[in-house]
Image: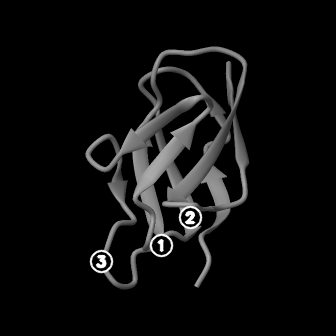
Amino acid sequence: MSLQIDSIDPAQGKQGDQVTLTGTLLRAQALRWGEEEWEEGQWEGGGSKPGEAEIYFTVPEGEGTIQVVAVNGDEQSNAVEFTYV
């Protein structure tokens, strides 16, 4: 089963906001936020728990529009965008 992000909610916000990614994410081992790659512990959900379809995280400092991708080794999901307001 491939990694797939179906939605990001909210798709825009500011530092400190809570964001939820929904999709086929149970095998995600890292989350790419723009140029940064976050290991487990910087976000919740996904991982190895069967049935997990959501990843939760807090928006870090930043600006502009960021591409968000779930990663497992060489496999990566589609990208979704988050825009700082």
Image coordinates for residue 49, horizontal then vertical, percent: 29, 77
State the separation of the CA atoms marked 2 and 1.
Answer: 6 Å
Image coordinates for residue 1, horizontal then vertical, percent: 58, 85
At label 2, which amino acid type do we have?
Thr
Q: Residues within 10 Å of mark 3 (few under 14, many from 20)?
A: few
Q: Nearer the viewer, mark 1 or mark 3?
A: 3
Image coordinates for residue 29, horizontal then vertical, percent: 40, 59
Left or right for 21, reference 85? left
Q: Which residue is mark 1?
A: 53
State the separation of the CA atoms marked 3 and 2.
Answer: 15 Å
Q: Which residue is mark 2?
A: 22
Which part of the image, by quadrant, shows the C terminus?
A: top right
- In this view, which residue lies farthest toward the front? 74
Q: Which residue is mark 3?
A: 49
Left or right for 32, reference 41? right
Q: Which element is circle 2 on?
A: strand
Q: Which element is circle 1 on?
A: loop
Q: Is residue 43 above or below residue 16?
A: below
| Point 72% across, 18% down: residue | 64
